[in-house]
Amino acid sequence: MAFAPNPLPPEIDYSTLALPLAEAMQAIGELNGAGRGLANPALVIRPLQRQEALLSSSMEGTYTTANALAIAEAGAETDVDDSTIEVRNYLRAFELADRLRQEIPISNRLIKQTHAMLLSGARRERGAHKRPGEYKDQQNFIGGRNRQIENARFIPPPPAETEIAMAALERYINRDQRGNTPAIIDAALFHYQFETIHPFADGNGRVGRILIPIFLMQENVLERPLLYLSPAVEGRKDDYVDLMLAVSRDGDWNGWLRFFLEMVTSSCRSACRTLSDLENLRHDMRSRVTNAGGSARDVMTIDDLFVTPVLSIPRLAERRGVTYPAAKAAVERLIALGILAEVESTSNPKLFICWPVVHLSEGR
């Protein structure tokens, strides 16, 4: 037996959701306001995305560290393990989805291309039928002792019904008549439906969490990619799973919706604090460079470190349009100021890392 979810929307008792809905919308408004106040939003978005990639992947059993991820982002292909490749792919998949949603609506095409990017290039097999960019062709299931379907906690729709269910979901999220359903509620409905259909052989949780801010930006609720739920959900992963299962088993939509709204509120407030910390760190590092008589190029390098906190001297020379000796001298100045540190056991080229930015990516 498998479970196929009913088409959206369900009957929703909004009387019990009024307060958490209002709090979530207020929190999103505050986050949008914080984003508008940033001197350069691009410089603080990347650390937030790095934190999301680390935590969303760890929820699915893929673990790496922020410094290993930063080294992979910097283009170091040697000694990069499979887990780090998968987490780096999360960042690339989000970037692709964000770019595509500005060209086409959220659709099966966008979802499949996001999934293909997520699973591209990873050498480790997490199953014989991952099918990057394609929906499952064999029955999948969730939980179960000894990985046996007979012991599964939940069995989603079979492959023959997956395409039908996903087509219906695409029609729902892009419908013309939205009625009185707030977009933030639609995001919760969309996320439950996607995870319940479980259309891919692998990567469903990560793709589903990527799509939450993508959908909210499509609906003009979120102005910039600043909202990520994994940091909040990570501490309540059992509730996250159990409450979606309760919708399938008992029709308890309101329990799931209250939880989702609480996670949005918590994530917005956490993101606002992190944005403030990142702006303060950026201001402090720029001030240290300026007070030490650093050049405008050094200040530009500080900004670069928030996007990619690992660099090499050849790459810095190329990026700044200077000679190797000039780039080497710039790196040495940043090391003396405590902004950069040498990454041990790297050579050809030797890498240098900005630990303060990396630590904020890990939520420290």
Image (cartoon, grey):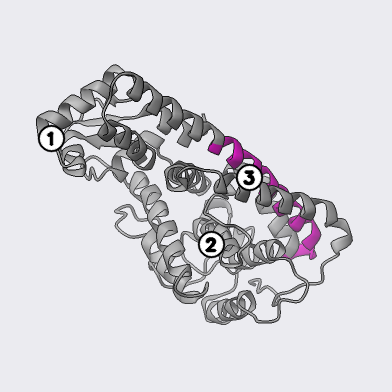
Q: Which mark is residue 348?
A: 1
Q: Is residue 35 magenta?
A: no
Residue 250 position within the rendered picture, expressed as x and y whole percent measured from the top left: 79, 63
The N terminus sits in image quarter: bottom right
Measured Cα–Cα span from mark 3 to mark 2: 15 Å
| Residue designated by label 3 | 267
Left or right of 180? Residue 275 is left
Residue type at the position of mark 3: Ser
Q: Secondary structure at mark 2?
A: helix
Q: Secondary structure at mark 1?
A: loop
Q: Secondary structure at mark 3?
A: helix
User: Which is nearer the eye, 164 or 21?
Assistant: 21
Q: Main secondary structure of the magenta part?
A: helix
Q: Is residue 274 magenta?
A: yes
Residue 122 position within the rendered picture, expressed as x and y whole percent measured from the top left: 32, 54
Q: Residues within 10 Å of mark 1 (few under 14, many from 20)?
A: few
Residue type at the position of mark 1: Asn
| Residue 116 figure quarter | bottom left
Q: Is residue 351 visible?
A: yes
Q: Which mark is residue 214?
A: 2
* Residues rendered magenta in the picture: 248-275
Mark with earlier residue (1, 2) = 2
